[in-house]
Image: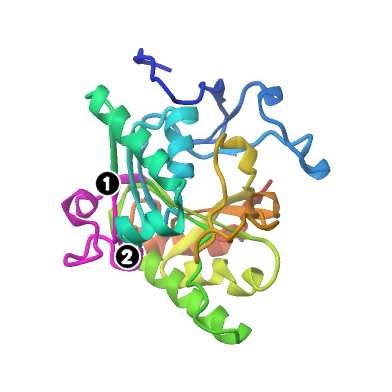
Amino acid sequence: MAKSRKQKSNLSAHTPYHRSSKAHDHTVKNAATIQVSQPQRQHQIPTIPFEPAHRILLVGEGDFSFAHSLYTSHHCENLIATCFDSAMALAEKYPQSTRNIQELENATCKDETVKVKILYGVDATKLGKGGLGSGGKEVKKGDFDRIVFNFPHVGGLTKDVNRQVRHNQELLVNFFKAALPLLASKGSIILTIFESEPYSLWNVRDLARHVHLKVGRSFKFQAEAYPGYKHARTLGNIEGGGGWKGETRDARTYIFERKDGEGRREQETSQKGKSSGSSDSDEDD
């Protein structure tokens, strides 16, 4: 890290990383420090689209293990982590969240340079708009380098696949619209979803295009790159533990950027994209 840090008790050890040639990305320096269980991923170095200096907003957190890993393993200290549930509902759905949140809050209390905040009852579709569920003034002031929504899902609203797809598409479109004004000039929206059906039916690239976003890059999401992270189901933990583990399923992360780069030259950039044929032809890893 560029700056020295106090040693944190009860937190996992830091993993060394270095920056890649891609802007705002850094990858694992020592791939041996992360055990990749699936054979097809053994030779891939995980892409980490976060840097310590980034101001990050996480929405839709489950048990806050991803936020915990960003802080403990990737040195992200300017972090607002939010969830849709109330504090009481969260503790009931994900009992393990209590420890993650306590450690994040304790770290903030012990080191004034750490700016990690936990917010409850935040609606990913109403960010910064005022009123309940907007995230309050901390979210409203925006200027985020990264706004992250991992594995969004509306939950079990219906068993009809087509209706589920439409409900989730509406969720994502409204999230994109709410998040876009809160980005820093060169900020990006990061979305991670599973690669299988019905998630592939959401057509996230098209949804983003309709709200003036483009895919700058996409890559395989590797849960092992975030030590301590566990996938949390929208409906809560499976009673008795169960055998369903989202972190072992194939998933993809999409990095969405403004089509105009800075939100001011949309038409010009759109024309250039059409002429070059690269407006939505992201690099897939």
Q: Mark 1 Cα within 10 Å, few/some/many (few <14, many 20+)?
A: some
* Magenta run includes residue 125: yes
Task: Choose mark 2 or mark 1, whichever is in front.
Answer: 2
Q: Give the left or right position of residue 21, taking residue 94 as reference.
A: right
Q: Give the left or right position of residue 136, taking residue 155 as reference.
A: left
- Identified by mark 2, the residue type is Asp
Percent of width and height locating residue 6: 34, 14
Q: Earlier in the sequence, mark 2 or mark 1?
A: 2
Which part of the image, by quadrant, shows the N terminus? Answer: top left
**What separation in Å lies between label 2 and label 1 (alpha carbons)?**
18 Å
Look at the numbered disc 1 and give the secondary structure of its residue.
Answer: loop
Percent of width and height locating residue 263: 33, 57
Work out whether 242 lies above or below 73. Answer: below
Q: Which mark is residue 143?
A: 1
User: Of all residues shown, which one is farthest toward the front?
Assistant: 240
* Magenta run includes residue 205: no
Work out whether 198 lies above or below 70. Answer: below
- Identified by mark 1, the residue type is Asp
Residue range in magenta is 119-145
Percent of width and height locating residue 235: 50, 66
Work out whether 172 lies above or below 265. Answer: below
Q: Is residue 187 visible?
A: yes
Look at the numbered disc 2 and give the secondary structure of its residue.
Answer: loop
Front residue of 267 and 183: 183
Q: Which residue is tagged 2?
A: 123
